[in-house]
Amino acid sequence: MDKLIIEGGHPLRGEVNISGAKNSAVAILPAALLAGAPCTIKNLPDIKDVANIIDILKQLGAEVNKESHDKVIINSNTINTYKVDFELSKKLRASYYFIGALLGRFKKAEVPFPGGCDIGVRPIDQHIKGFEALGAKVIIEHGIIRAEADELVGAPIFLDVVSVGATINIMLAACMAKGTTIIENAAKEPYIVDTANFLNALGANIKGAGTDEIKIKGVETLGGCEHTIIPDQMEAGTYMIAAAASKGDIIVKNIIPTHLDSISAKMREMGVNIIENGDSLRVIANTRPKAVNIKTLPYPGFPTDLQQPMSVLLSISDGTAIINESIYDGRFKHVDELKKMGAKISVEGRIAIVEGVPKLLGAPVCATDLRAGAAMVVAGLSAEGETVISNITHIERGYENFENKLIKLGAKVKRINEED
């Protein structure tokens, strides 16, 4: 296991290019199973979650040709099984998209319960509700989700909670179902739109992605396509927050600024100067940020994935802030690590009260999950002295080339092996 060592106190300066969106990639790659001809997918982030999804595709029998670090060609005509390997499935949360994709293709799917970050209860009941509404029988036994249907038939489906995963999974299963499926109370995240655009490029008939009602008219077959994945708003937001925490001045390039509106708005409220310019943002932070309150919400609200990095910025802000985490009940596990660095944060259920301190102090800390790991990096960049972050495999699941991108921005970061 490797560790990151960060010497704090060096403001980030320069330009950083944002990679493709992790949350799009892990949905679009399984969606390629529905294609009747080869697909070319570009702007893939070079991260562990993508590598794990590709391993599952290969295990199922697909031909995957990686032409470059961010481009693959997938031929799913060679798939020879509808059963996903247990060990591969438990490496990431997004393995559940193979249920919808395999069900849509074969009318059968066997996928072990997914793994991923421990950030609280994340049930898949809305996924199952959708599959059953389409006519599938779903059984869970021995840790395996088995779904099977004689045929899939379009139906109206109302999601009890707004769920990105359930929205995408139902879209995958419904693409080639008979008739029309209407998903109400659908998630509106950019990943939904990106996945729908990919499926439509294959020949699907999906309308309304990005709104709370999505209509899917089933088609008999799907073809192939070439698709470029959207930029990663969470990676972009992390660098924006890191620049502010280190009192830096950076340009975040290759982004869609409207995807970042909720983050930009909060940071401007904190006194950070943010300037939009086409597909880039400049983030300038000269002074100590002001405390603001945050409530995480489904898109277009403030994203839960950036709550943890933002809590670091709030921990060194002027004043007291309240964070309301309305999405996941286990997303404050990083707080104990921040307290080791001098943060004053108290947690009661899904509420955190953050009393800003003038500075954090470097300390040995642990990445408890993906975004908590990013938060520890932000904390290390802003802290006085040296911060050592262990369990960084979590960070590698979602951030491409994180330490090298930071080094190019002037951060003092190095990786060591634990044995060293």
Image (cartoon, grey):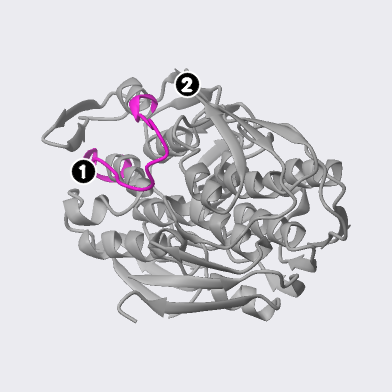
Q: Residue at 71% across / 66% down in the picture?
A: 254
Instruction: Give whichever of 148, 273 is nearer the camera.
Output: 273
Which residue is identified by label 2?
159
User: What is the x, y in percent for residue 353?
Assistant: 64, 31
Q: Residue at 71% across / 69% down in the picture?
A: 9
Does 77 sit left or right of 51 as displayed?
left
Which residue is identified by label 1?
112
Q: From which residue to which does the magenta span run?
A: 104-126
Instruction: Provide the secondary structure element on which disc 2 rests.
Output: loop
Does 378 sit left or right of 317 as displayed?
left
Instruction: Provide the secondary structure element on which disc 1 rests.
Output: strand
Instruction: Give whichever of 419, 186 is nearer the camera.
Output: 419
Does 10 sit left or right of 177 as displayed?
right
104 versus 122 height, above or below: below
Q: Quadrant of the N terminus?
A: bottom left
* In the image, residue 420 lies in the stretch drawn in magenta: no
Q: Which mark is residue 26?
A: none
User: What is the x, y in percent for residue 212?
Assistant: 61, 26
